[in-house]
Image (spheres, grey):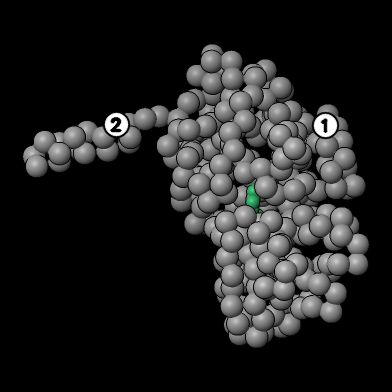
Amino acid sequence: MKRTILALTTLTLLAAAAQARTWDQIKASGTIKIATEGAFKPFNYFEGKKLTGFEVDLGTAIAKQLGVKVEWITQPFDNLLIGLGQDRYDFVIASHGITPERAKAVDFSDPHYCTGGAIISKPGGPKTAADLVGKTVAVQVGTTYLDNVSKIKGVKEVKTFPKDTDAEAALMAGRADAWVSDKFLGLDAVKSMPGKLVQGDLLFQEKIAMAVKKGNESLVKELNASLAKLENNGTYAKLSNQYFGQDIRCR
Ligand code: ARG
């Protein structure tokens, strides 16, 4: 018994002592490890076996600008910030909105885009917060969509799904009256299924940023400097236009 307690304490201490890699250590290793989800089109998704999207291209451009190679790691959305705490990768770029709650657990970079949570439904379905009263709403678990929809009084049921694409599928299959997701992602979905989906009101706005392990100041500094360079040298605008037909940076 004593031994077990001792072993457990040692493990806990080791875990706590594990340090996130500083920028100097990452640079010396030659490779930065970036995590994302891979199921949030057009931000981070798979095209066949290839991980791609605005955030994947942006992350790759940041690594290139910083002069290191990149290793991509994909994780379910709900695990991404936890893995950061366990030093499984150096930073996360997966459309995380900056929230006070998340900011207790991780440190955020400057925002890499500004957006909002929008209502998406089938033609004739709910379009406003008031329309959601008495309705079933599908959202991805662990998201700001869940937090915000939960605050609306009178919603009949909020159904949560591991992936945003599952929430979309629930709407399409008639198991939900509305889906709440990113406004740019929604526009993309509406465009790819003409006549099948419509985008309603924005429920809230948010700033999206990259996350590093709490206290990794040297890395945040490099990420911010690199993002600023890409915003100033046209790289950001080119990528944003390619994926969205507009520049989605915060203004
Ligand atoms: N912007 C929303 C949030 O901050 C959703 C992010 C979902 N990202 C993803 N890769 N599925 O919670």
Residue shown at 62% from the left, 55% from the top:
163
Q: Residue 227 or 166: which is nearer the viewer?
A: 166
Decide if residue 250 is in sight here. Answer: yes
Q: Position of residue 157 (x, y in %)?
A: 59, 78
Check disc 1 and give the amino acid type: Thr
Seen in the picture, residue 36 relative to 114 is either above or below; the reply is above
Residue 237, located in which quarter of the rendered image?
A: top right
Q: Position of residue 161 (x, y in %)?
A: 59, 61
Disc number placed over residue 14 in the picture, else none: 2
Q: Position of residue 215 (x, y in %)?
A: 46, 37
Name, please, the residue furthest toward the left: 2
Q: Nearer the viewer, mark 2 or mark 1?
A: 2
Work out how far the residue at label 2 is from the one at label 1, CA to CA, in angstroms. 41 Å
Crowd class of label 1 (few under 14; some 14 to 19; many from 20; radius 10 Å): some
Name, please, the residue furthest toward the front: 173
Residue under numbered circle 1: 235
Decide if residue 109 is in sight here. Answer: no
Residue 169, located in which quarter of the rendered image?
A: bottom right
Residue shown at 71% from the left, 62% from the top:
168
Crowd class of label 2 (few under 14; some 14 to 19; many from 20; radius 10 Å): few
Residue 150, located in which quarter of the rendered image?
A: bottom right
Residue 23 vs residue 113: left or right? left
